[in-house]
Structures are given as structure tokens and as C-alpha cells.
Image (spheres, rainbow, N blue to C red):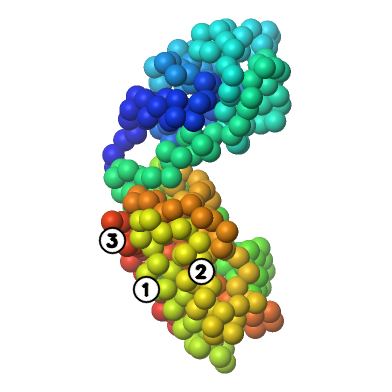
Amino acid sequence: MTKTDPAARLRRLQQQMKATGTELLALAPGAHMHWLLGFAPHPDERLCLLLVGHEKAAWVMPALNATDARQHTDLPFHEWADATGPAQALAETLADICPAPRRLSLDETMRADHALMLLDALPGAAHSLAGAEVGALRLIKDAGECEALAENARIADEAQKAVRAALRPGVTETEMVQVARDAFAAHGARCEFGIVAFGPNSAFPHHHSGPRTLAPGDVVLVDIGGRKGAHYSDITRMAAYGHAPEGYDDVHAVVESAVVAALAAVRPGVPAHAVDDAARGVIEQAGYGAFFTHRTGHGIGTEVHEPPYMTSANTDLLEEGMVFTIEPGIYLPGRFGIRLEEVAIVTADGARILSGLSRALHIA
């Protein structure tokens, strides 16, 4: 897979900061930092920040982590030890990068105590969140990121197949989640979440898998995602043991049509809500609008949920290189739920889905 070019991304970020009028940007260990540098130090209660100005960047770095972190970055460090605390290192880094910014941008995932420490050190700075800077750049995936997402989608397909192969009477939902975890691990990935829902439990969109056992006629909803490297997968498919329950096939056909309609709506220049509108319109026309209770999709990359979000209120325009899920669903309480989920890349002429696994119902 193509490796991150931190220097090039830092230059792009600094140009974006100039465009937004942001003089200082503070990143904490997390997805923004990982996108920028290809790594992030271990996050804990110790203050660890990357401060970025228009011309240079530097770390406020706990001495405990400095030796390891130097293997991954050549940006300068201002270290601090547990015995002395971070105040002096923070002051030195600010003096080096931008001592009196008029506008400061904060990583949305920064610990509140770290954010307050930084704000207290810069009382005159207006502040906003880093979505306008790093987030805006992360929206458009480059070729290396698309390659990584495709590889993760391939692994998720294999994990789905492993779950299907393990379905048998008496197996529990939690046992099937473990099958998915093992399958991800066998391909060098880590399972980051797993929803396996049997029978009526599939009508809960975010079901917590439990001890329910599989019986003939049960629907099986499998929503799983993993991560190999920095990027995630997210896929939902449907199965049934022995046979599907009465009425299932008609509802599955509606959800499948909603996926197809949403994919057809994807192209550069259309508002994100058009994707949600397309899927929701199909489901509403079929009379199931009240049973589609969530958005049609979410962005995916170095986080499993990130912008852009496919909601009815999102007027942001799609651009080539954006990547997001399309996952309409219908949830009938006490009976069954159906969700079919793809990860799609916006291309010049439409959408390219990453999974190769059929969305048809699998009968085990």
C-alpha cells in the first residue's frame, strides 16, 4: 500500500490553514494526526500535542514517549517530564510556532483538560474545530487511501463468509461475533466492531449481540468492520438459517432497490442529501418509511464514522474521491430487520463499491 507522505500533507494543511485564516492548529493523538503523519503516539492523560503554524510545526511531547515517537517523525520536540509537568514545554512550543494567534483550531477529539490548558495559555485567541482544516483534507481520499480501503473491504468480505460458514442450530450471537474477530485476525486485521443479530433482534439497528441461539427460520443480520493499518471496513449482509421468515423476500427487495437508487444518485456535484433522498424515497414509496430510522450512510477512512454524512439535511456537494457507506434499512419490530451496506467511492462518473460480496440473502 502507498505510504503517507507527511511533509506533503503538512504543506497541504498549512495552505488550508491560510485559506481559513487559522494561525495555529492543535492536534491530539487520533485520526487527524494519523492522517497527517501516518502514526499517532499512545493517548493518555499526559499532554501530547502537535502544534502547527503557517511555516512550521512542533510537538509538546511527554518524555516517556519521546524515544519511540522519534522513530516516526522528524518534527522538533519540546519534552516534559512527569516530575515537572507540561506548562513550560507548552509555552516553549507556542513561542516557537505561534505565540499569539488570533485564531486557533482544536482537534475535535482532544481531551477536555488538554483543550482547556491550551485555551488558558492563549486567552486572546478565537477558537474553532479542526474539521475546517484537517477534516476538509481528509474528505478526499488519494489513491493510496482508496487502495487501503479496498483491501480492508476484501478482508471484511472474507469475515462475512466465515460467519456464514459457521452458522448452525444452537450457536449464539456472541459466538458468531468471535468467528468474525478470528477471521479478521487471520487476514492481519483487527475487528473493531461486530453486530450479529438473530431473528427479531435484527430489528434493533445497533443490537448488542448476546446469548440468543440460532434456530431454523431465523434471519441473521451481520454488520462488521475491521482495520488493517490505518483504514477501516464496514459491511452489512443478511442471511437466514434454513429458510427466511414469511414476508422477508419482499422487504429485502425494497432495501436492495434503495441501495441501487442511492448508488445511482452518487456523482460529483450533487448534494449529499440526494443520496439519502434516493434511498428514503424508495422505502417510503413501498410504505416502510416509518421503519427506516437512521441516515443512509457515513464517511469512512481513518475513522469508521467521519464526514461526509448521507443525511436529508446535508447540502455539501459530493466530490470525486469521497468515500462513504450506503446502508438503508427497514426494521420491523418483533419480526426482523434488514440492512444492506456498501462502501462507495465517488468517481468521475458515479460510484464504485468496494465489496465483492453479493447483497442477496444467504441461506445457511
Of the two numbered discs 3 and 2 on the same chain, state the one appearing first in sequence. Answer: 2
Q: Looking at this view, is 274 or 6 the one in front?
A: 274
Q: Amino acid at mark 1?
A: Ser
Q: Residues within 10 Å of mark 1 (few under 14, many from 20)?
A: few
Relative image position of residue 250 (x, y in whole percent): 50, 88
Relative image position of residue 173 (x, y in whole percent): 60, 68
SS at mark 2?
A: helix
User: Is 316 placed above or below 128 here?
Assistant: below
Q: Amino acid at mark 3?
A: Asp
Q: Residue at x 47, y 58 (%)?
A: 272
> Is 1 situated left or right of 74 in this image?
left
Does the CB distance between marks 3 and 2 fall below 8 Å? Answer: no
Q: Residue at x 64, y 7 (%)?
A: 88
Residue at which label 1 appears: 358
Q: Is residue 169 visible?
A: no
Q: Residues within 10 Å of mark 3 (few under 14, many from 20)?
A: few
Residue 249 circle label: none
Residue at which label 2 appears: 277
Relative image position of residue 60 (x, y in whole percent): 56, 16
> Is 94 situated left or right of 87 in this image?
left
Q: Residue at x 42, y 16 (%)?
A: 55
Q: Residue at x 63, y 27 (%)?
A: 127
Of the two numbered discs 1 and 3 on the same chain, state the one appearing first in sequence. Answer: 3
Q: Looking at this view, is 356 or 138 the one in front?
A: 138
Residue at which label 3 appears: 349
Q: Amino acid at mark 2?
A: Asp
Distance CA(mark 1)–CA(mark 2): 24 Å
User: Is 226 placed above or below 175 here?
Assistant: above
User: Is 66 placed above or below 161 here?
Assistant: above
SS at mark 3?
A: loop
User: Is 142 placed above or below 50 here?
Assistant: below
